[in-house]
Image (spheres, rainbow, N blue to C red):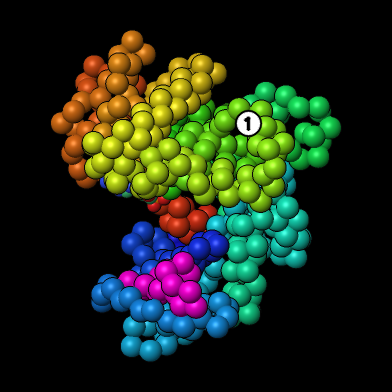
Amino acid sequence: MLSSVTILVMNAGSSSHKVCLYQLPDPTPRWQGVVDWTKEMGKALVTTKTAQGKWEEVVPVTDRASVLRDFLATIWQGERRVLDRPEEIRVVGHRVVHGGQVYQQPVPIDGQVKATIREMIKFAPVHNPANLGGIELMEEVLPQVPQVAVFDTAFHSQMPLPAKVYPLPYRYFEQGIYRYGFHGISHQYVAGEAAKFLQRDLTDLKVITCHLGNGCSLTAVRGGISVNTTMGFTPLAGVMMGTRSGDIDPGILIYLLREGLTADDLDRLLNRESGLLGVSGISNDLRTILAAADNDRAQLAYQIFIHRLRGAIGSLLANLGGLDALVFTAGIGENSAQVREDVCANWEFWGIAVDPDRNHSRPCPIDISRDRSKVRVLVIPTQEDWAIAQACYEFVVKGVV
Ligand code: AMP
């Protein structure tokens, strides 16, 4: 058994940079920080949290890398530090959105891994550059410390071909245009936690995991393997989301292109101006939509959201051949009893029945199904950072890094 291992987890995105420091095997982060680039032009909101308290500061941004360097240094310098020296960090784990067809597991980062992440920028133009930036920053700040990449696409890499391949001319599949799926770290983590919670072996279980947050995706997990998922070649596919359309008739895109919209116009329309926001016209946040009881468009947006979630579950179920557990996770999945109730309504004939009292109970993880429900309906908080830290820890235990 190892003594405690200090692991830093980075989740670098286009709008924020999240960092979490763990002392494994303790699952409680010792230090958590977020740099939010979106609050004000030329400024960033920096939030830090330790056992000593929580701090928020607005800092000027001339270049992002120097803001991040200063931000990271507060882990081992100054009055809020939790480490004496940066060398105490044993491994840095990175969430990487797109690992292409190559990576099916977490990997220690080397030149080849970086080259693949760079190559996949063509398929993930917003996320992979930010992930690569985080890796290169850590190479500069902690040059001696090994780094590990954990991919959002990896969990879906074993999906059977009928779920993966689009009915386009086959050459497009050969060019890498197929369903990759995303949110894999979350789906894999909550499926594993569901098995632990039910005291069952994951290899014997059929589970549908519903990751409902700002982005939403559902995955069918059979025997611990993702066999189908709603997101596709990009994270735009599948169910309706806060600002993303999810699946629409591709003929609409052809029509709009002929009407004069450019590729950039379509990108903005489908990724930022659609979904709950697009239909309601008021918000991408489900709390605001639910609170707007007298707003017809907000109500319609909610109804479409539920309609599409139910449709997606039905479609995943069709090829899963049974269901032991339906799992809700992420911001909406964990917090909205209304969504869970509406998604599961009138499915007793499929053996899904939610108990209204349990649905409002806490703490999580929790089983919210009725005793007679054949399918267990679970609410399990997702912990992507913790899942990444565990993957790094395994490498340390096995002597890989
Ligand atoms: P995430 O991406 O997992 O952080 O989820 C963020 C989203 O969760 C927000 O945009 C909200 O729409 C949603 N959310 C958080 N809390 C609630 C709640 N109590 N009821 C409904 N939706 C919620």
Q: Residue at x 20, y 26 (%)?
A: 355
Q: Residue at x 24, y 16 (%)?
A: 372
Rendering coords of residue 238 (x, y %)? 53, 33
346 and 60: which is toward the camera: 60
Q: Quadrant of the N terminus?
A: bottom left
Please give the residue where the numbered disc 1 appears in the rendered image: 252
Left or right relative to 317: residue 109:
right
Within the image, what quadrant is residue 25 found in?
bottom left
Rendering coords of residue 53 (x, y %)? 26, 75
Rendering coords of residue 301 (x, y %)? 38, 34
Q: Is residue 24 shown above or below 55? A: above
Give neighbour class at mark 1: few <14, some 14-19, many 20+ (Cα, 10 Å). few
Q: Is residue 92 shown above or below 227? A: below
- Amino acid carrying mark 1 in the image: Ile
Quick check: is 46 in the magenta stretch? yes
Rendering coords of residue 247 (x, y %)? 56, 32
Quick check: is 251 in the magenta stretch? no
Magenta stretch, residue numbers: 33-50
